[in-house]
Image (cartoon, rainbow, N blue to C red):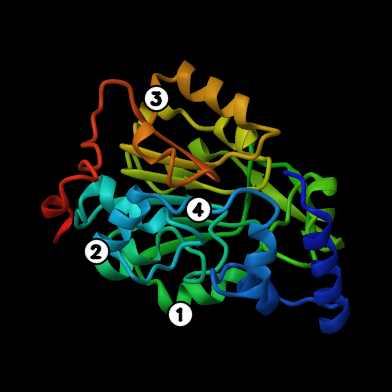
Amino acid sequence: MKRPLLATLGLILVGAIAGTGATIAAIRASRNPDSIFSKLRASAGAAPQDTSEANWLARHYGPTRHSMYLEEWIIRDFFKDRQQGVFVDVGAADYEAGSNTYFLETGLGWSGIAIDAQNAYRTGYVAHRPRTTFFSSFVSDHSNDEATLFLAAGASASSSTQGFSANYGGVKGSIEVPTITLNDLLASQGMTSFDFLSMDIELAEPLALAGLDLQRFHPALVTVEAHPEVRQQLLDYFAANHYIVVGKYLRVDPVNLWFMPLGATVAPFPPEHKPDEWQH
């Protein structure tokens, strides 16, 4: 997605102040919804909508959250704060800041797998997420190869597409990361099913999904960051696998697409004119 000129200049200014050697601390800051990095990143695209539905989510699950936007509240709403589920978090980044799965583990007792191409995130998971197994790999459509990850200087937007990373404060370098398919990784862990899939890997989502047998694992809910460049590919993939868009969340989240199996249902938000239904 294209970044407005002011946001780009802002990231360049941040980089100039901080120096060219941006560290994992700066990347972690970009995952904090209140940080300047996050605000600059959000200005590149649509921010969460201030709607009655968003207000309802805040009433029931807020006021705090760990996810970048409203993802944590949406997940909790879909599963109705279900306990003891299983997640797979692809592009997991920091163990807490901006995490879609931190509250699932720490607040609801879920467990699962976190995968990120940058091994620097491992320490946080080992220290603070005992129910999560962390893997440092590039999730792709084939295993046992290497992929180049271009490291964005200004935000947690590192991508295998160099031009994408360059939009986020420039490219500060690159690393080679071993590839693996989700099918192979999940099989290595003896996992035959899971409840929730989160995927945010900066234009590599179609490649990663090509290595996942969605019908075999059949998660109840999937969220995928949907940049315009790959949005149609995502819609086509899920349609081919008999998943549908969860329309309930379209107005509150313009950044991600949410999917559930064809035939599944989710209760709509209560009508705005019935305030008694908006209470806890």
Q: Nearer the viewer, mark 2 or mark 1?
A: 2
Q: Please indicate, yes or no, whether residue 149 appears anywhere in the rendered image.
A: no
For residue 5, what is the image quadrant? Answer: bottom right
Query: Tag 4: residue type?
Result: Pro
For mark 1, give the secondary structure: helix
Q: Position of residue 138 (x, y in %)?
A: 65, 48
Q: Nearer the viewer, mark 4 or mark 1?
A: 4
Determine the residue located farthest toward the left in the rendered image. 276
Which residue is disc 3 drawn over?
244
Q: 231 above or below 276?
A: above
Dots 2, 4 in contact, CB < 8 A: no
For mark 4, give the secondary structure: loop
Which residue is disc 4 drawn over?
48
Distance in Å between CA atoms under marks 2 and 3: 26 Å
Of mark 2 and mark 4, the one earlier in the sequence is: 4
Q: Nearer the viewer, mark 2 or mark 3?
A: 3
For residue 219, what is the image quadrant? Answer: top left
Of mark 2 and mark 1, the one earlier in the sequence is: 2
Q: Nearer the viewer, mark 3 or mark 4?
A: 4
For residue 60, what is the image quadrant? Answer: bottom left
Q: 263 above or below 124?
A: above
Query: Tag 3: residue type?
Result: Ile
Q: Residue at x 80, y 76 (%)?
A: 14
- Check the picture and name the quadrant holding the N terminus: top right
Which residue is disc 1 drawn over?
127
Q: Residue at x 37, y 53 (%)?
A: 54
